[in-house]
Image: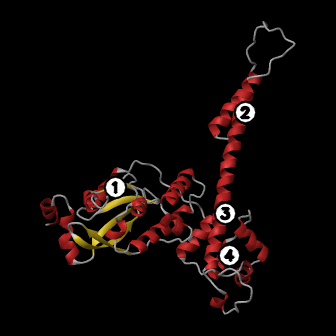
Amino acid sequence: MPLRQSLFFAERSAGTRAPNKSASASAPSRPATPAEMSVVPARLLATMHSDVDQISQRACERRRAELGKFLKARRARLSPGDFGMPPGSRRRTPGLRREEVALLAGVGVTWYTWLEQGRQINASTQVLDAVARTLRLDRAEREHLYRLAEATPLRTECTRLVVPDTIREIVYSLEPLPASLVNSRFDILMSNHASEELFWEWHTMPCVHQNTLWCCVTEPSARAKFVEYDNQVRYMVARLRSAYGRHVGDPAWEEDIRRLGSMSREFAELWARHEVAEVEPRTLTYLHPRAGRLSLAVSELNPSELPEARIVVYTPRDDDTRARMPLTRRNPAAAEAIIG
């Protein structure tokens, strides 16, 4: 039952009583005593605590379920041969078995089984380290594992829509380099003019999402305009999955992922891989309708004021791209003056 509705019924049940059939219908009502009035706040408080506990419990259950799926996906990509073990017979599914992971990691089979099943058990960093080494997790995957197992503090998502003036000034001061401020869900919080004009006409449909990932997987022309499209989208989904570990059970995140998965089969298939990634040097090759082929280095700056936001900057990788960047502006002459 939603919190608001449960509060309503708690107040109704505390403030109303069944009529006393033996009492006269015309008997005057008396004001409630202080003791009776105190019942309503007490019941409301109890109801609020109950709802908060249920929400927290559901989030923990989702996080443990996510952990189990992640571990299954990671062991499925390994084989006994990777560890010098015989493949064995009657192996119906690819990858390592649970008991093999437990044996290689030096942990109990029952404990590891419960971990994958999403049971509520304590997992120390030492044991998680052993599992991570066995599954050959990289740095981003290891951090994702710890986050889902609640072995590391959760970071707070910056959900404020107001961007500090200092951050705005930094983004605008990066002109003529295209730059934008993006959060961990790839929502575009703000952009400078160079960034807006670099990408302003690559959509064949109106941009209603204001989200880099949504635009890529729902825009029909995206694949034709981004040379490394497959790698770029796979990387973004892996970055989203990594950030999701901090927000499992968050209604906004869950709804966002559900809707995007229903709209894009490509996203749904990539999301099901449970791949995670951290920031890494990237190159974006963009086929601009007027400037032609642009080779851009993608850099990220992390402002301390917004912990889960990043400033994404596009820098020309060669002289040819640098010379043609003014053609991306709607007023090339003015852009030449800025650059010159």
Q: Is residue 78 left or right of residue 257?
A: right
Q: Which of label 4 and label 1 is nearer to you?
A: 1
Q: Amino acid at mark 2?
A: Ala
- Write down the residue under mark 3: 65
Q: Earlier in the sequence, mark 3 or mark 2?
A: 2
Q: Quadrant of residue 144?
A: bottom right
Q: State the CA–CA distance, disc 3 to disc 1.
A: 37 Å
Q: Which residue is mark 4?
A: 126
Q: Position of residue 175 (x, y in %)?
A: 24, 61
Is residue 255 at all visible to an observer of this figure?
yes
* Among numbered discs 4 and 3, the one appearing first in the sequence: 3
At label 3, which amino acid type do we have? Ala
Whole-number angstrom distance, CA of label 2 to CA of label 1: 54 Å
**Label 2: which secondary element:** helix
| Residue that carries the numbered disc 2 in the rendered image | 42
Residue 325, given in percent of the width and then of the height, sits at: 21, 68
Quadrant that contains the C terminus: bottom left
Mark 1 residue type: Met
Instruction: Give the SS element for disc 3.
Output: helix
Instruction: Tell me: residue 161, above or below residue 278.
Output: above
Residue nearest the viewer, comparing 259 with 14? 259
Which-is-in-front pick, marks 2 and 1?
1
Looking at the image, residue 248 lies above or below residue 4: below
Residue 113 falls left or right of residue 314: right
Q: Position of residue 11 (x, y in %)?
A: 69, 29
Circle 2 residues within 10 Å: few <14, some 14–19, many ≥20: few
Q: Mark 4 near mark 2, Cβ–Cβ under 8 Å?
A: no
Q: What element does badge 4 sit on?
A: helix
Look at 47% across and 54% down and name the residue there: 158
